[in-house]
Image: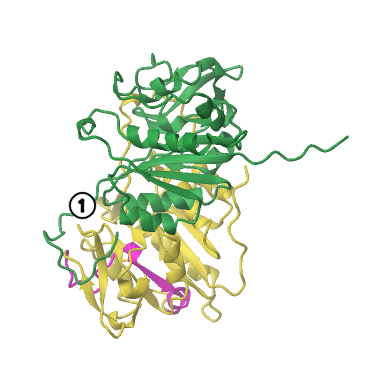
Amino acid sequence: PRRRPEAALPTIYAITPTYSRPVQKAELTRLANTFRQVSRLHWILVEDAAARSELVTRFVAGAGLPCTHLHVPTPRRYKRPGLPRATEQRNAGLAWLRQRHQHLPPPQPGVLFFADDDNTYSLELFQEMRTTRKVSVWPVGLVGGRRYERPLVENGKVVGWYTGWRADRPFAIDMAGFAVSLQVILSHPKAVFKRRGSQPGMQESDFLKQITTVEELEPKANNCTKVLVWHTRTEKVNLANEPKYHLDTVNIEV
Amino acid sequence: YVYSRPPPWSDTLPTIFVITPTYTRPVQKAELTRLANTFLHVQNLHWVVVEDSPRRTNLVSNVLEKAGLNFTHLNVETPKSLKLGLSWIPSHIPRGTLQRNLGLHWLRDSFSNTAPPEGVVYFADDDNTYSLELFEEMRYTRRVSVWPVAFVGGLRYESPKVNPAGKVVGWKTVFDPNRPFAIDMAGFAISVKLILEKPHASFKLEGVKGGYQETSLLKDLVTMDGLEPKAANCTKVLVWHTRTERPTLVNEGKRGFTDPRVEV
């Protein structure tokens, strides 16, 4: 029998919104250390900023993996507590992908996911998401006031949601709990994260219902029973001893 | 699942022994995972993980086995109180101390002073953030090397003060800069040779003033003018003292809601 040629390894696109604060460089560094272990991963870093910052520009130059550096500022009126964050940045990542592939013939297979810069990702997660055909889902640790949240799976299909908060959402899942094939993103050019008419906590759900149905979801991580990603958050640093004005003889980036 | 292997072991490169104390809490597996993801890049790294626990846990064993790193898995429990004659007094042993000392003890047990391996010892807490560059800076430490650390002492970073001749002459800190070694645990590395030469040097267990833990070890190993400044004469930040928020598990309730068999 004739041997079938190996299919190209799908590229994983990680869309990471990021913003300036003391721990930013540390977060990006340890994230890069993880991503650099994953083959064919393309990092799309989107700063919440009116212009590319020097820190992130320098970082990207030395990041050690394919990286696209974008920026878009969040409008002031959306910077209130309780409002969803990183909407414009994630949409900028989606727009870049759509733009880049609009003229290419059948796009290279790809999978994208939204990787916040303070979460923790196991290497196994990337192996799981790479085989996404349309939209795949998996558990997320340390979110929703629980040790984990996860999709409920029966006979290989998602039938509900095991979550600490509003299980009645059409897709009761965290941003870190799903991946979407590039093909689906390209074939749904209007699917974006919404501002208008969106309720707090509904970001993921409002986005996913534009591109898929619960029935179509592909459960990963052993039928959604393993935690391969954690919604960690980093403490705000104590800078109480910093002088009001720059006193040191050198300017050291942190 | 097969993790990416670390770079092949080299017989000529000095080994970096990383001693990490760790303890059970919800974010433990996440912390160890992202640490492993970093360490997998570093050639000739031997990870000594010491659990603060009466027994080595399955959670940590599995992380270590799956990661593919060279490792040693130890454990010692920090007592909450100490027996003094017939009574119990609360133990004030700072977190991580017994575990770090056990790591040193293992090193001294495993290698002989007459033929010490080329290498260096580094104390890496499981919630800090380490750049890959840091490990190459510390690899060729002769006695004790030092560098800046971000987010300690209420500052963007603390740093050794280095004179134009490349010697450490003091400490750029706001908190108690007159400590013999005003430096964070993450800011120095010690050659294995020196550890083996001075078998009684270890972290003091009790009666250590806040901020003096590092001094309690270093004073028996080196003097300030013997320190080797790294990271471009201590002008670059290659390690950050990050801390992870405690996750709010309010929805677990008194008896726990989620399936405890699902490991987090």
Relative image position of residue A151 (x, y in whole percent): 48, 22
Q: Is residue B57 left or right of residue B95?
A: right
Q: Colour of chain B?
A: yellow
Q: How is the image coloured?
A: by chain
Question: Which residue is most to the bottom?
Answer: B165
Residue name at image x 30 percent, y 48 percent: A51
Secondary structure at badge 1 equals loop
Q: Colour of chain A?
A: green
Q: Position of residue B81 (x, y in %)?
A: 29, 50
Residue at the spot 53% in from the left edge and 76% down from the top edge: B118
Residue B93, placed above or below residue A79:
below
Instruction: Please tell me whether residue B192 belongs to the stretch shown in magenta.
Output: yes
Quadrant showing the N terminus of chain A: top right
Determine which quarter of the picture holds residue A17: top left
Relative to B25, B49 lies left or right: right
**Image spot of residue A67 (x, y percent):** 47, 49
| A131 to B79, vertically: above or below | above
Residue in front for this viewpoint, A92 or A229? A92
Task: From the top left corner, tell me how far across and down residue B250 is, in percent.
Answer: 30, 27
- Residue B262 versus residue A161: which sits nearer the camera? A161
Give the residue type at disc 1: Asn
Residue B54 shows in the view: no
Residue to which mark 1 is pinned: A238
Is any atom of residue A205 visible in this view?
A: yes
Q: Which residues are magenta?
A: B175-197
Q: Residues within 10 Å of mark 1 (few under 14, many from 20)?
A: some
When asked about the image quadrant of residue A198, the answer is: top left
Tell me the quarter of the image containing the C terminus of chain A: bottom left
Q: Position of B245 compared to B189: left or right?
A: left
B37 falls in the magenta region: no
